[in-house]
Image (cartoon, rainbow, N blue to C red):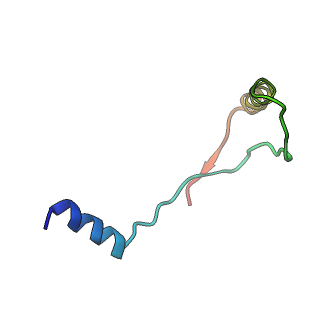
Amino acid sequence: MDIREEKIRLWLKHPPKIQFPVPLNLPEFSKKSFRNYDEMNAWKNEYLKEIAAKGGIKWKNC
């Protein structure tokens, strides 16, 4: 048996627990609808400017 197959079988039997960081101070926003990508990108740029003006995002590791 190939060592790669052994690794895959091991990971399938014992899947690793993946932890992702969680943003703590992300500004809230409601559901949005956009007519095109230009509108979405304009909103996204304003949202990112708001985050930058607040000094960025703090993260919590789970």
**The C terminus, quarter of image:** bottom right
> Can you give x and y, in whole percent of width and height, for residue 52 in the image?
72, 29
> Can you give x and y, in whole percent of width and height, for residue 34 in the image?
83, 34
Farthest-out residue, bottom: 13
- Residue at left offset 55%, top offset 55%: 61
**29 sits left or right of 55 in the view:** right
Residue 9 appears in which quarter of the rendering?
A: bottom left
Farthest-out residue, left: 1
- Residue at left offset 78%, top offset 30%: 40
- Residue at left offset 45%, top offset 66%: 17
Residue 10 appears in which quarter of the rendering?
A: bottom left
**3 sits left or right of 38 in the view:** left
- Residue 5 or residue 46, whichever sits in front: 5
Tell me if residue 36 comes above or below residue 13 in the rendering: above
- Residue 19 or residue 32, whichever sits in front: 32
> Can you give x and y, in whole percent of width and height, for residue 48 in the image?
73, 30
Tell me if residue 31 comes above or below residue 34 in the rendering: below
Q: Count the marks: how many? A: 0
